[in-house]
Image: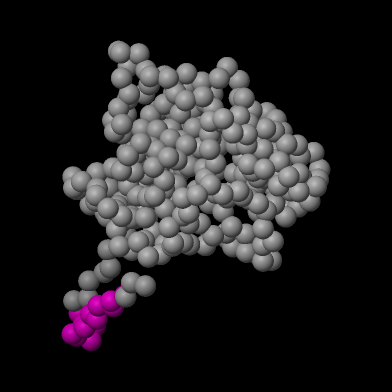
Amino acid sequence: MRGLRFPVLICLGLVAAGCGTTPRPVPPPDNHAVTVPRNAGIYKVGNPYQIDNVWYYPHEQPDYDETGIASWYGPTFYGKSTANGEAYDGNALTAAHRTLPMPVNVRVTNLDNGKSIVVRVNDRGPYARGRIIDLSRRAAELLDVVQTGTAKVRVTYLSRADLEGGGPPPSITPPEIASALPAAPTAKVDTAALNLLPGAPVAPPVKQSVLPTPAVPPPMQVASNQPTGQVVQEPVPAATHLYVQVGAFSKLANAKTLLSKLGGDLRISPLQRNGQTLYRVRTGPLNSVEDADAELSRMTGAGSNDAHIVVDQ
């Protein structure tokens, strides 16, 4: 907590001595526009943290590729410190993510119009259930998200980003996280529903995207891996839908167990990938963000803390 200093003014004289009047504070501009100084910040992975009884586990994710709903945050955050110590600037091409290292570059593609840009993740968030990334206002403008407030997107990890002061990212993971969590097992493992302690839900693991791998842009539209503001047109499906997914398993028996536990209108949707079958337990398709939010709320209320919104054809 910052300390407060109270200046003491001593007025000499009994009647009309020289005590000056306190100047009136200048009100902030109506549009919240401020001049944001550049700040070098630091490279940071971060330790596990908890928001609204949900635990999040930041870690290196070079294969991150996820679909879901994007939102954006605006003027009321201008000038405030981001999670890695930089200053938020709504005119910069930045974003907030719950678990990716900071800063890293990711490609965000609007699955409704195919517009795609690179943004720099330097903050934590969003904390609203059902959202996977918070965009700066400028990034949201380039992707046509400002008016709608949300959009179906695909987020793909590209690389570590340079620090604001121009310094390169570290070649190894900083010591702060090296001992925070044990290394993930390298052998193939199955996932299954756990009996969670009451009031202690956990954030869902990273979901693999089910959309096609983006095609290489045409020669005249070469995509950059840096947040230059260049908007490229990525090939996207003609139509996509929203689903609320509560689990994904390599064994059908595990999927059936979760299905029988939660019931409702859930179904098992198999997916063939790399010669293997993934059994996804989900509800949908849903045609609007509002419908998906309502279904997500219903599923979490039924006890599925791992429920999340995904985008699929």
Above/below status of 304 relative to 284? below
Q: Which residues are magenta?
A: 4-17
Q: Nearer the viewer, residue 260 or 144?
A: 260
Query: Could you tell me which residue is drawn at 30 percent across and 62 percent down?
Result: 175
Residue 30 drawn at (x, y percent): 40, 44
Residue 5: say if magenta. yes
* Residue under the point 54% across and 60% down: 55
Residue 8 vs residue 75, the one in the foreground: 75
Determine whether, in the image, residue 7 is placed left or right of residue 194. Answer: left
The image position of residue 223, as x and y in percent, is 33, 24
Quick check: 89 above or below 220? below
Which residue is more in the foreground, 81 or 156?
A: 156
The answer to which image quadrant residue 200 occupies is bottom right
**Residue 256 visible to an observer of this rendering:** yes
In which quadrant is the C terminus drawn? Answer: top right
Q: Position of residue 43 (x, y in %)?
A: 29, 53
Name the image quarter holding residue 11.
Answer: bottom left
Q: Main secondary structure of the magenta part?
A: loop
Residue 303 occupies which quadrant of the picture? bottom right
Please tell me which residue is depicted at 24% across the width and 49% down the height of the picture.
Answer: 171
156 left or right of 202 in image: left
Magenta region includes residue 37? no
Q: Is residue 164 visible?
A: no
